[in-house]
Amino acid sequence: MIALQPVTSESRLREAFGCFPSGVTAVCALIDGVPHGMAASSFTSVSLAPPLVSLCIQRTSSTWPRLRDRRLGLSVLAEGQDDACRRLSSRGDRFRGIPWQPGPDGGVFITGSSALLECSLEEEVPAGDHLIALLRIHGLHTAETPPLVFHGSRFRRLAAV
């Protein structure tokens, strides 16, 4: 029988979570004509009917309260957009050097992304130290660009088989 260890530290739990690769998204909107946004790697498809996706957002986020009640641009970042992800995860001018385009209803999209989803908040569910945001998709665009992958605390590329 396998011996499982108890969850004794956040670092061990983070290590286990890092075993699962994920895509990386940018969630952005225009506020008073200025782009605001953040990176989120906990993006998941939820439902085809109605069209829903989810994000997990830290409760301590100072960006999410400004975004939650707006039409959002969700960009699935593409291979090679590592710097955009780092910038959107930092403090300061997150959009400096990142090409972006406004959406028709106030969302902001990162140019060159694998997919673009225009969304609005459907429901928010408390979950420990995070919030699960269910987002309704209103419009989309896809490209044939491979996605940016985050695995084991590093950015990686998909290998063609």
Image (cartoon, helix red, strand yellow):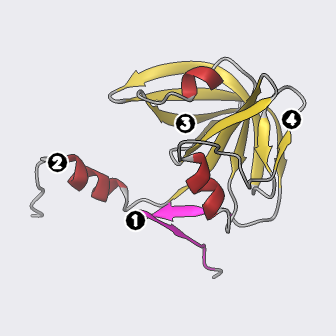
> Taking 105 as reference, is 38 left or right?
left
As drawn, 32 above or below 104: above
Residue 131 in the image: x percent, y percent? Answer: 45, 27
Q: Mark 3 points at which residue?
A: 55
Quarter of the picture containing the C terminus is: bottom right
Asked if the stretch drawn in magenta spans residue 157, the answer is yes
Q: Name the residue under label 4.
A: 103
Quarter of the picture containing the N terminus is: bottom left
Asked if the stretch drawn in magenta spans residue 116, the answer is no
Q: Name the residue under label 2.
A: 9
The crowding category of the residue bearing disc 3, from other C-alpha atoms within 10 Å (few below 14, some 14 to 19, many at least 20), is many
Residue at (23, 47) in percent of width and height: 10
Amino acid type, residue under disc 4 in the picture: Gly
Amino acid type, residue under disc 1 in the picture: Gly
Res 39 visible: yes
Tell me the distance, in whole angstroms, between the alpha carbons under discs 4 and 3: 20 Å
> Taking 142 as reference, is 4 left or right?
left
Amino acid type, residue under disc 3 in the picture: Leu
Circle 1 SS class: loop
Amino acid type, residue under disc 2 in the picture: Ser
Q: Do residues under tags 4 and 3 come within 8 Å of each other at their CB atoms?
A: no
Residue furthest out toward the bottom: 161
What is the span of residues highlighted in magenta in the rendered image? 147-159
Residue at (57, 18) in percent of width and height: 123
Residue at (60, 47) in percent of width and height: 88
As drawn, 31 above or below 158: above
Tell me the distance, in whole angstroms, between the alpha carbons under discs 1 and 3: 19 Å
Q: Do residues under tags 1 and 2 come within 8 Å of each other at their CB atoms?
A: no
